[in-house]
Image: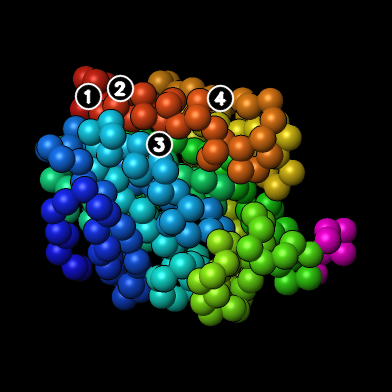
Amino acid sequence: MDAPRSGPEPQPVTIDSGGVPLAALLYLPGARPRGALLVCHGAGSRKENHAIMAEQAVAAGLAALLFDFRGHGASGGAMDAHGSDDVLAAGDALRRLSGAAWVAARGASMGAMLLVLAARRRPDLLRSLVLLCPADGPSLLRGLDRAAGRDDRAEPVPAGRPGAITPGDPSRLGDRYTGRFDEAVLRPFLARLDLIAEARGLRRVLLAHARDDADVPFDHSRRLAAVLEPPARFIALAEGGHHGPGRSPEVARATLAWVLAHGTTEDATRG
């Protein structure tokens, strides 16, 4: 792993995730960080699309790490059934490189789904979670079908617009939304995934979802919220679509308040 340099600008680092190199950007505040925030993008997206959240975290005194999942952005490999490995590798790297006492995480869509799986595997790593429109298996399978032109009901989404993903296209880095997916592995994994069961009993989770989300059903987050243990919070946005929670100033403020509150409470130190 590359050693970070000090300074206000984000520093590029490379994280090893089981042999897959992940490209990342480490943000450090000017003083010792109060904690750290790991930011996880969605399917077809990349780390640069979430730079504003990292900058806001640093302004709040947090270290932050943006990274490209396998098969995305400047990272290697293809997205497969090991995406939660990337979360764990990035979380460990953030804690080590920042020296922060705790790490929280915020994820969007696929990134939120993989955060749930990572938190189930390693409950000690992530102090609290912020899940924006967490994707379920059927939604991601529909996304793969649309990207490959197998969904006759949906018009193709031009590359560069939200929602466009291009499995098999190795690195069109000029596009904001592109990715490489190992469908032979990913499809059976998503078909058997039960995210509600994986989320059952998780604590310190903030959920946000827009009611008019056309990509991931709003009801999926409502059912997920019902199986969480307190403390938990569900922000239901009236509108904004699939990308609304990630662009919402209200949700950004709630994210920082949530992770700071649960990074310092007695409840968090026991979990």
The image position of residue 102, as x and y in percent, is: 22, 38
Q: Which residue is mark 3?
A: 129
Residue appearing at x 46%, y 45% in the figure: 107
First in residue order: circle 4 vs circle 2: 4
Q: Which mark is residue 261?
A: 2
Q: CA distance from mark 4 to mark 1?
A: 22 Å
Instruction: Measuring from the top left, give residue 54's x and y in whole percent.
Output: 35, 44
Q: Is residue 75 above or below residue 237?
A: below
Q: Which residue is mark 4?
A: 235
- Which residue: 54% across, 38% down? 247
Residue nearest the observer in this picture, 125 or 15? 15
Q: Report helix, strand or loop for mark 4.
A: strand
Q: Amino acid at mark 4?
A: Ile
Identify the amino acid type marked 2.
Ala
Residue that numbered label 1 is attached to:
264
Quick one: label 3 or label 2, which is nearer the N terminus?
3
Q: Residue at x 78, y 70 (%)?
A: 149
Q: Amino acid at mark 3?
A: Leu
Q: Residues within 10 Å of mark 1 (few under 14, many from 20)?
A: some
Q: Is residue 180 visible?
A: yes
Q: Which amino acid is tagged 1?
A: Thr
Q: Is residue 208 above or below residue 120?
A: above
- Quadrant for the N terminus in the image: bottom left
The verdict on residue 177 being magenta is: no
Whether label 3 touches label 1, CB < 8 Å: no
Q: Are marks 1 and 2 in contact (CB under 8 Å)?
A: yes
Q: Quadrant of residue 5?
A: bottom left
**Magenta-highlighted residues:** 150-155
